[in-house]
Image (cartoon, rainbow, N blue to C red):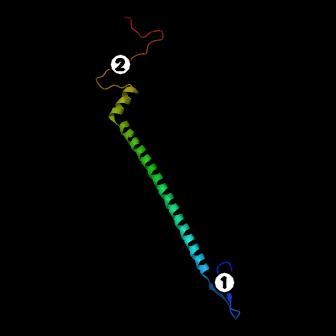
């Protein structure tokens, strides 16, 4: 037989299987192949997980940098300096004791230069 296991007939009708060295070689080869495939599969899975971990860490770092920038912007928007700037420029408010001066745009037809 081609599988490496031969059937030996004895004088009686009972069949007995005899294991040949070829069978053991084939069995060891199949075992080694199985172990190699298992190791390679595990290695590929570990590699993929490490790659995913690196990607997630980079994403976390980018999000933390963006979060820090937002915190700095929030701190600036809540500062007295920004509030005063908005009050002066957008609302036209002045501090006590100051006088507001509004410069009117030149009328159409005026050159904007005073007579000198």
In the image, 14: left or right of 116?
A: right
Looking at the image, the residue that sits furthest to the bottom is 11
Image quarter of the N terminus: bottom right
Q: Is 36 located above or below residue 98 in the figure?
A: below
Q: Residue at x 44, y 50 (%)?
A: 60
Q: Residue at x 38, y 36 (%)?
A: 77
Q: Is 92 located above or below residue 32 in the figure?
A: above
Q: Position of residue 49 (x, y in %)?
A: 49, 58
Mark 2 Cα shell of 10 Å, populated few (<14), some (14-19), many (≥20): few
Q: Residue at x 63, y 86 (%)?
A: 18
Image quarter of the C terminus: top left
Secondary structure under the numbered disc 1 in the rendered image: strand
Residue corresponding to mark 1: 6
Residue 2, quarter of picture = bottom right
Q: Is 78 located above or below residue 49 in the figure?
A: above
Mark 1 Cα shell of 10 Å, populated few (<14), some (14-19), many (≥20): some
Q: Residue at x 56, y 73 (%)?
A: 31
Q: Position of residue 92 (x, y in %)?
A: 38, 25
Cα gap from disc 1 to disc 2, whole angstroms: 112 Å
Looking at the image, the residue that sits furthest to the top is 116
Secondary structure under the numbered disc 2 in the rendered image: loop
Residue corresponding to mark 2: 101
Q: Position of residue 96 (x, y in %)?
A: 29, 25
Return the residue nearer the eye: 19 or 46.
Answer: 19
């Amino acid at each position: 037989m081609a599988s490496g296991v031969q059937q030996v007939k004895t004088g009686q009708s009972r069949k007995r299987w005899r294991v040949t060295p070829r069978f053991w070689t084939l069995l060891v080869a199949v075992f080694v192949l199985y172990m190699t495939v298992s190791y390679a599969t595990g290695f590929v899975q570990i590699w993929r997980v490490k790659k995913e971990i690196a990607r997630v860490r980079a994403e976390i770092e980018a999000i933390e940098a963006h979060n820090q920038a937002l915190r700095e912007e929030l701190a600036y928007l809540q500062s007295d300096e920004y509030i005063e700037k908005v009050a002066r420029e957008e609302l036209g408010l002045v501090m006590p004791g100051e006088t507001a001066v509004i410069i009117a745009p030149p009328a159409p037809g005026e050159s904007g230069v005073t007579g000198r």
